Image (cartoon, grey):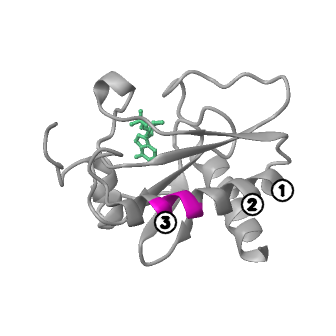
Amino acid sequence: MPSYDPNNIFAKILRGELPCYKVYEDDKALAFLDIMPRAPGHTLVLPKAPARNILDVPAADLAHVATVAQKIAKAAMTAFAADGITVQQFNEGAGGQVVFHLHVHVIPRKAGQPMKPPAAEKEKPEVLAEQARTLAAALAAG
Ligand code: AMP
């Protein structure tokens, strides 16, 4: 497996070199909206420490990302009036991974509404900003 590339786009977001629609942050994890959402509220949860994917991440960092993904999933049920949540996580190109810093997709779902294909359409900045505010508020409300 190739080694971690510190110039991947999510590493740049983690360093503050590129913007994101942040919904949650603690000392070990960051969560922000996917700019090409497969459904409204599609969120990505990342460990802050460098890790390419599930194959090299320390188990404790993976466990923390899972804990944050659960928090986001619960908050998203309320924030987006969801009927369910799809969680996805891809590893290496053959496994569907495109950005090589570990991330977990948390995707709110409505009954009967299929997900869009990956990276199909960029959402409008004002829509993403509003959704990030809504989800962050639901998280803060616990
Ligand atoms: P994957 O590596 O297959 O899990 O997919 C990477 C995901 O990152 C895709 O869903 C993209 O829409 C998303 N993505 C790519 N660039 C950005 C970005 N700058 N901000 C937020 N999401 C992004």
Q: Quadrant of the C terminus?
A: bottom right
Camera-nearest label, 3 or 1: 3
Residue 57 in view here: yes
Does the magenta segment cover residue 65? yes
Which residue is at a point 35% across and 59% down the rendered structure image?
13
**In the image, is 122 to the left or to the right of 54?**
right
Counting residues from the N terminus, which is met first, the one under dot 3 or under dot 1? 3
Report helix, strand or loop for mark 2.
helix
Counting residues from the N terminus, which is met first, the one under dot 3 or under dot 2? 3
Q: Which residue is mark 2?
A: 75
Report helix, strand or loop for mark 1.
helix
Span colored in magenta: 63-68
The amino acid sitting under disc 1 is Thr
Q: CB atoms at circles 1 and 2 under 8 Å apart?
A: yes
Q: In terms of image quadrants, where is residue 137?
A: bottom right
In the depicted structure, whether residue 72 falls above or below residue 35: below
Residue closest to the eye, 71 or 54: 54
The amino acid sitting under disc 2 is Ala
Q: Which residue is mark 1?
A: 78
Q: Is mark 1 within 8 Å of ligand 1?
A: no
Which residue is at a point 59% across and 56% down the rendered structure image?
69
**In the image, is 20 to the left or to the right of 9?**
right
Q: Which residue is mark 3?
A: 64
Q: Report the image quarter containing ligand 1.
A: top left
| Neighbour tally class for label 2: few under 14, some 14-19, many 20 plus, Cα within 10 Å | many
Which residue is at a point 76% across and 66% down the rendered structure image?
138
Distance of label 3 from label 2 (alpha carbons):
17 Å
Distance of label 3 from label 1 (alpha carbons):
22 Å
The percent coordinates of residue 68 (x first, y second) are 57, 63
The percent coordinates of residue 59 (x first, y second) are 38, 60
